[in-house]
Amino acid sequence: MTIRFDFYTPSEIAETLGQRLRTQRLSLNLTQAALAERSGIGISTVARIESGQGGTLDNIIRLAIALGMVNHFAELFDVAPTSIEDVIAKQNPRLRASNKSGE
């Protein structure tokens, strides 16, 4: 079952992703130290991310690469068209947001 994050707080999302990271690390039979070495980040950073205390996007990407899961980022922030107008708009993407407040 896929979990949706619609009603999660940022800290709840970080905790869930940290748990998933830990599960994947353990399924590959890696210690935190081994994952830290593979990814080029500190062991305390691995532990902090696994416990849901956050981390930089760069470090999370490094961990995903080390775990062979980097392709899970492929659809992150990719907007799937839901109408023909969306398809047309994707061909001519906006380069800036408008200057109007609230949008």
Image (cartoon, rainbow, N blue to C red):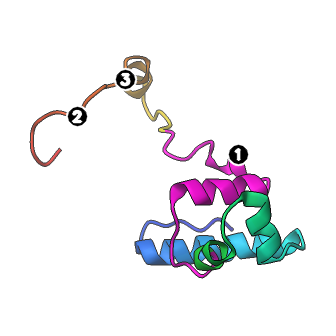
Asked if labels 3 and 2 touch by Cβ distance under 8 angstroms, the answer is no
Magenta span: 50-78
* Among the 4 quarters of the image, the one containing residue 1: bottom right
**Labels in figure, total:** 3
In percent of width and height, residue 43 lies at 69, 75
Instruction: Tell me, yes or no, if residue 8 can be seen here.
Output: no
Q: Earlier in the sequence, mark 1 or mark 2?
A: 1
- As drawn, the label of residue 97 is 2
- Which three-letter amino acid code belongs to the residue tagged 2? Ala
Residue 66 drawn in magenta? yes
Query: Residue visible at 48% across and 44% down?
Result: 77
In percent of width and height, residue 87 lies at 45, 23
Residue 86 drawn in magenta? no
- Which three-letter amino acid code belongs to the residue tagged 1? Asn
Q: How packed is label 1: few (under 14 Cα within 10 Å), some, or many (20 or more)?
A: few
- Which three-letter amino acid code belongs to the residue tagged 3? Pro
**Residue annotated with mark 1:** 71
Image position of 25 (left or right of 72): right
Query: Residue visible at 41% across and 75% down?
Result: 9
Q: How packed is label 3: few (under 14 Cα within 10 Å), some, or many (20 or more)?
A: few
